[in-house]
């Protein structure tokens, strides 16, 4: 049982379990949290899971947990682990079933006052255009050949086909395509599950939101991102849908029986992993890249449908521009500095977001001076944040949290509050909710999550990223 | 005997399943997963689907069985309420699923995890917990 006495305090925002805590730890385990938030983390098994992550073969420097960490399976959610390329391990569980779940933010030229008369109509139109895809997808089912093009071509392929513009490629993490994707590594089952899912939202904590910029903290960065006070923006949170889920299922089935032959011993089967340069590791990575391309394509097409809805209500001359798109369930090959030396790593972010600093070569030119936009959605009806990457975050492989993090189970949430009460409370604050499941709304009630302001304060104070803007929801859309 | 219980888990859904036999355990796991999916069923006749799974051991067989049913649910837009086993060993299942067409699902199960899944024989029943990623 892990308790506070097992921790060494590094700073007010950073705590460390030394690797001597347990014999099989290869590196220390570190948690970014305030002292108060650390007390909450003890209430579930996230720290034990973090210690388990520190046993991964090839892991470098630390196993990390972000301030929104909570119990998952294998990795804790909000977990980060970098292993040495190419012989260090890659773990499907270190990415999760929803491969490349992520967030994108679009900016409009409207203010809150200007949009108010149209808000309800916009929410209705967006809900019509973007289905949840649960048990039934979009009306058009793509052929296997079309799915293959999306898996390998990602967002650039869709833009070539006439969906969107060049800035939609530039302003997306990885420019919307990981080139290592290989469709021959993807099962027919995964492709079959994805055929009618491109342009669907999913359920649970996935959403579209119309938001306003409530507060600006960093004027220079806000200007670079195209943000101003009271501006209307649109946020989309979703991932790779059934395609990614099946892809992860397929590879866990391969990796779990495979890892013992590499002499790997693990404290938890869900950490199943193989050397990155093994045949299984290579195939998984290439298949994961394909799933990431699918997810970026999904968010891109949802953006396309939202743009349609926007124009149908506000007129053809209006448009929504992509600020940025970030992934928060992914494994990436990145170069980082270890002991003064540039080292290639396989960075696993499970419920954690990349946050590159100013002048990093992998961020768009217009953001070079201020750093990568980082998008942190709050729980339903609460604030979301835009931050910018910092150089100090190098200690965490340039990573921050991905959201608020849950504090209670879905059942507990539905026991404490009804969906209708959640909607009534939000409506009292002037927030419109469009949904089809009251139970789903109750499960996602703000009381079920940590306070996003506290989580972001830790990120900001620990200098993992710096606050740029606080966004407040005006309309929450949860699929038709 | 209870077929399954829903347990507490912070982010996902965990169930505890019971069965007098291994076959009944698997059937009740199917029913538990169906409960979580909350399908909206269409009127009409029963659908039958063949299922054939091979796996390393009984635990992974259960994960593979439920994962296969999840796959069939998604691509066929059907919900499966019952199964007639033709063959059942610790490594293999062959059977006929019975189900109906659905309008939609109420919940999205992303995956059937292996987390703490260990099928055990108690005095006169079999049991395990299963965690579903939601």
Image (tube, rainbow, N blue to C red):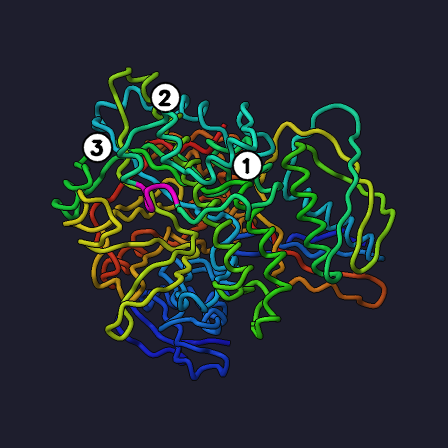
Q: Residue A308: give its label.
A: 2
Crowding near the residue tagged with mark 3, few <14, some 14–19, many ≥20 C-alpha atoms within 10 Å:
many
Q: Residue A113: give its label.
A: none
Q: Of label 3 and label 1, which has the lower sequence position?
A: 1
Residue range (magenta): A172-177
Label 1: element kind = helix
| Cα distance in 3D space between marks 3 and 1 | 35 Å
Q: Of label 3 and label 2, which has the lower sequence position?
A: 3
Residue at 40% in and 76% down: A27
Q: Residue A194: give its label.
A: 1
- Residue A394 on image: x %, y %: 26, 64
Are callouts 1 and 2 both on one chain? yes
Which of the chains bears the disc numbered 1? A
Label 3: element kind = strand
Which of the chains bears the disc numbered 3? A
Which of the chains bears the disc numbered 2? A
């Amino acid at each position: 049982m892990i308790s506070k006495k097992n921790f060494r305090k590094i700073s007010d925002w950073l705590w460390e379990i030394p690797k001597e805590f347990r014999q099989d730890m290869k590196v220390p385990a570190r948690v970014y949290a305030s002292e108060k938030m650390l007390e909450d983390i003890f209430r579930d098994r996230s720290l034990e899971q973090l210690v388990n992550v520190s046993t991964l073969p090839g892991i470098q420097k630390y196993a990390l947990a972000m301030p929104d960490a909570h119990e998952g399976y294998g990795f804790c959610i909000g977990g980060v682990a970098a292993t040495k390329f190419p012989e260090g391990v890659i773990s499907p569980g270190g990415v999760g079933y929803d491969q490349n779940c992520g967030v994108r933010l679009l900016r409009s030229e409207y203010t809150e006052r200007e949009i108010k008369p149209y808000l309800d109509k916009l929410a209705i139109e967006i809900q019509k255009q973007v289905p949840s895809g649960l048990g039934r997808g979009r009306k058009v089912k793509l052929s296997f050949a079309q799915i293959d093009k999306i898996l390998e071509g990602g967002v650039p392929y869709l833009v070539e086909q006439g969906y969107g513009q060049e800035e939609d490629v530039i302003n997306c993490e990885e420019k919307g395509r990981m080139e290592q994707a290989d469709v021959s590594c993807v099962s027919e089952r995964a492709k079959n599950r994805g055929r009618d899912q491109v342009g669907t939202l999913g359920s649970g904590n996935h959403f579209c939101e119309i938001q306003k910029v409530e507060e600006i903290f960093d004027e220079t960065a806000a200007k670079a991102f195209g943000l101003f006070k009271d501006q209307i923006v649109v946020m989309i949170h979703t991932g790779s849908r059934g395609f990614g889920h099946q892809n992860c299922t397929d590879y866990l089935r391969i990796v779990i029986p495979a890892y013992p032959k590499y002499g790997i011993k693990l404290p938890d089967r869900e950490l199943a992993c193989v050397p990155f340069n093994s045949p299984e590791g290579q195939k998984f990575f290439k298949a994961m890249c394909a799933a990431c391309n699918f997810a970026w394509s999904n968010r891109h097409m949802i953006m396309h449908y939202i743009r349609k809805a926007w124009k149908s209500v506000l007129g053809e001359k209006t448009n929504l521009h992509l600020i940025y798109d970030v992934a928060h369930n992914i494994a990436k090959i990145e170069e980082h500095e270890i002991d003064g030396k540039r080292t290639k790593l396989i960075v696993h972010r499970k419920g954690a977001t990349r946050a590159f600093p100013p002048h990093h070569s992998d961020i768009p030119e217009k953001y070079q001076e201020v750093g990568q936009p980082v998008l942190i959605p709050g729980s339903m009806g609460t604030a979301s944040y835009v931050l910018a990457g910092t150089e100090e975050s190098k200690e965490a492989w340039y990573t921050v949290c991905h959201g608020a993090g849950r504090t209670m189970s879905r059942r507990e949430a539905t026991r404490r509050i009804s969906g209708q009460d959640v909607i009534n409370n939000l409506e009292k604050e002037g927030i419109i909710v469009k949904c089809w499941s009251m139970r789903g709304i109750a499960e996602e009630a703000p009381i079920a999550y940590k306070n996003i302001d506290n989580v972001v304060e830790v990120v900001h104070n620990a200098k993992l990223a710096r606050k740029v803007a606080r966004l407040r929801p005006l309309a929450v859309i949860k699929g038709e | 005997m209870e077929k399954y219980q829903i347990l507490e888990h912070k982010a996902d859904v965990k169930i505890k399943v019971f069965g007098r036999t291994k076959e009944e355990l698997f059937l009740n796991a199917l029913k538990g997963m169906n409960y979580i999916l909350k399908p909206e069923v269409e009127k009409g006749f029963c659908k039958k689907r063949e299922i054939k799974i091979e796996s390393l051991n009984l635990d992974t067989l259960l994960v593979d069985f439920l994962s296969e049913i999840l796959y069939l649910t998604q691509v066929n837009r059907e919900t499966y309420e019952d199964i007639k086993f033709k063959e059942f060993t610790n490594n293999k299942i062959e059977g006929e699923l019975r189900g109906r067409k659905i309008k939609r699902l109420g919940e999205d199960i992303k995956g059937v995890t292996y987390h703490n899944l260990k099928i055990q024989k108690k005095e006169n029943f079999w049991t395990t917990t299963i965690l579903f990623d939601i």
